Amino acid sequence: MCLKYHCPICGTSLGYEGLCWKCKAEKNRQDVLKWTPEQVKQKQEYLIQNIKGLEDFNEPEYTDFWNLLCYRDAITSEIQRAALEAKVFYPNEIYYHAPEDVRNALIAALLETNDSGAAGELMSCLAMQGDDKALETLLELERNPRPWRKRLYVAPSIYAQCGGWTFDKDGHRIQLNFDTCYPMVKGTAGEETPVKIGRIREDSCPHCGGKMVDIFVLNGRDERLKFLGIDGILTATCCPNCVGFLECPAYNRFTLDGGTEVFPSKLFDDEDKMECYMRLEDYKSMAENSFVLAKNPVPLFYGADCEDVNTIGGFANWVQDWEYTTCPVCGKPMKYLAQIQWDTIMDGIEGTLYIEVCSDCKVVSMHHQQT
């Protein structure tokens, strides 16, 4: 393809005239953030009247839903009741913290169905609703499975994870995400920030020879990040070349003074070698990115339906299914901490890196998903 055009905003070389996809996504986001209260109300009413459009991602209702949820936190109980009446159960995020009457109807539908596909959808919706009654219902179904359970790949406690929580065998709730979200935004040269993406290290990866990278460094003492409960520095270290090939997450232990101990990878034997696909310009681009922590928090789903936003807390944009890893030290589920979109810090690199934390053991995990 002849790249004879350039994005008029960022200068990216393009094979067509107009905005690059990242600048187009940012423009859409800014347009939605500028909606007046009257415009938000109009979008909500239109969605209620055309709620079946949610079943087709090509329809404007689908786009309106995600814009209202992610950027305006404006999904109302009226929208949730309209979806329930129309038996629209996807996207399941529409039922996030739905009122009791909606929850009760979801439970009734779940307990009445004999269809495994419908049961899976309804469990995901109930997980998004997420209150104690939802937990009680999924726990009962875990302990006393219905016949449709045999046709599903995972148990109700795994379906609960899509709502950012799960439960143990005794029915105790385990929270898997944080109830605050901050984006990382483009800053100016030299701007102070408690978060750094991509700090190149001196040591090399034993498997590919590429540079090890402190891919994410966070100062939990910053007032904006107190919600994380990390009283010091968290450092997540990996080989950015190898982390995308691992069948299990990359792990390291961090110390609150900024130290890090990388755990050996289970994918590679000591003698295994692989090619390093990272170029010098990739490391340079990663290290010189200008992302800083935003001044103010955003809705929890701010980064849940886009591929150009890096976030801390809230909900992730899972490329595939949600994936909460297990702490290799204590064996408990880890908590989702942050997502980094690779192509926001390196050109032409696809996929998303998800970072999770076990605060008790001071362990972080990093795993990669892409289409």
Image (cartoon, rainbow, N blue to C red):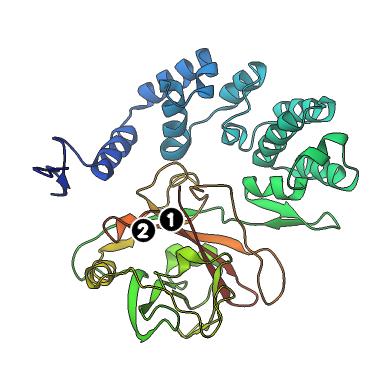
Residue for point 72% across, 70% down:
331
The answer to whether 179 is drawn above or below residue 101 in the figure is: below
Label at residue 39: none
Q: Kindly check if marks 1 and 2 are in contact, taking CB atoms under 8 A apart as contact.
A: yes
Q: In the rendered image of this protein, does residue 152 appear above or below residue 342?
A: above
Horizontally, residue 188 falls left or right of residue 229, namely: left
Q: Which residue is mark 2?
A: 342
- Looking at the image, residue 334 sits to the left or right of residue 38; the answer is right
Mark 1, residue position: 352
Asked whether residue 294 is in view, the answer is: no
Amino acid found under the numbered disc labelled 2: Trp
Name the one closer to the observer, 295 or 255: 255
Left or right, 168 with respect to 241, comes to: right
Q: Quadrant of residue 141?
A: top right
- Residue at (55% x, 17% y) in the render: 52
Above-or-below relation of 253 to 7: below
Quadrant position of the N terminus in the picture: top left
Residue drawn at (47%, 17%) of the image: 45
Task: Spot the residue most to the top.
Answer: 49
- Image location of residue 92, percent across then percent down: 60, 34
Determine crowd level at label 2: few under 14, some 14-19, many 20+ residues with C-alpha closer than 10 A.
many
Going by the picture, which residue comes out furthest to the right?
A: 144
Coordinates of residue 316 in the picture (x, y in percent):
50, 50
Q: Nearer the viewer, residue 12 or 143?
A: 12
Please state which amino acid type lies under the numbered disc 1: Thr
Question: Which residue is at a point 68% across and 31% down the rendered structure image?
Answer: 99
Residue 110, horizontal then vertical, whole percent: 78, 30
Sequence-wise first label, 1 or 2: 2
Tell me the element at label 2.
helix
Whole-percent x, y for residue 114 in the image = 82, 27
Q: CA distance from mark 1 to mark 2?
A: 6 Å
